[in-house]
Image (spheres, rainbow, N blue to C red):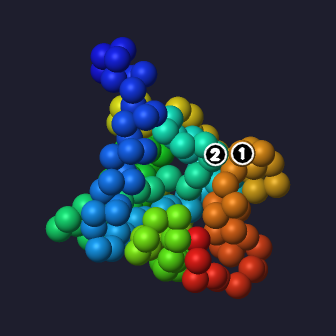
Amino acid sequence: MTQWRTRLEPVITPAFRTWWRLRRAMTLGVRGIVTDREGAVLLVRHTYTKGWHLPGGGVERGESAVAALKRELEEEGGVSPLGAPLLLGCYANHSFPNDHILAYRVIEWRPVNAESGHEIAERGFFALDALPIETTRGTRRRLAEAFGGTPISTHW
């Protein structure tokens, strides 16, 4: 990727995503909760927004949610799910009008080469009691629902 695109990506990507979300009637995204054998959870840090997040992204036209999850986990997280992921919940994300996110729990996976370009600044597995300080509130809430017995919310 050229240097000018690398420098402009943090500006271009959020602007494009905002325009895209406002232009569409409803958007659907997916996020995956992936753990390693020790129970550490996979998180990613994007180049275009602050904080550590569960890997995931938008469901494309003609794509199923599970196919989008698989694609996003491979691109962003470097993992490929084995077997069917378990749906944890469906959340309204009021950061953008009419945005909804499906959160899935991925039990088994295999490593693959991540091909996110310059979208992902960092990725890694973190113990639940040692998450990065910058882990987003939504991510922390999903982890509390998946592992801490917190009731599942309807809002991200």
Residue 66 seen in this snapshot: no
The answer to the question of whether label 1 and label 2 lie on touching residues, with beta carbons closer than 8 A, is yes
* Residue in the picture at 56% in, 55% down: 54
Closer to the N terminus: mark 1 or mark 2? 2
* Residue in the picture at 33% in, 73% down: 26
* Residue in the picture at 45% in, 33% down: 10
Q: Residues within 10 Å of mark 2 (few under 14, many from 20)?
A: some
Question: Which residue is label 2 attached to?
Answer: 51
Question: Which residue is label 1 attached to?
Answer: 134
Q: Residue furthest toward the top?
A: 3
Does residue 29 appear left or right of residue 60 in this picture?
Answer: right
Residue 4 seen in this snapshot: yes
Question: As rendered, which of 101 and 87 lies closer to the eye?
Answer: 101
Question: As rendered, which of 120 and 127 lies closer to the eye?
Answer: 120
Q: CA distance from mark 1 to mark 2?
A: 5 Å
**Residue 66, located in which quarter of the rendered image?**
bottom left
Please state which amino acid type lies under the numbered disc 1. Glu
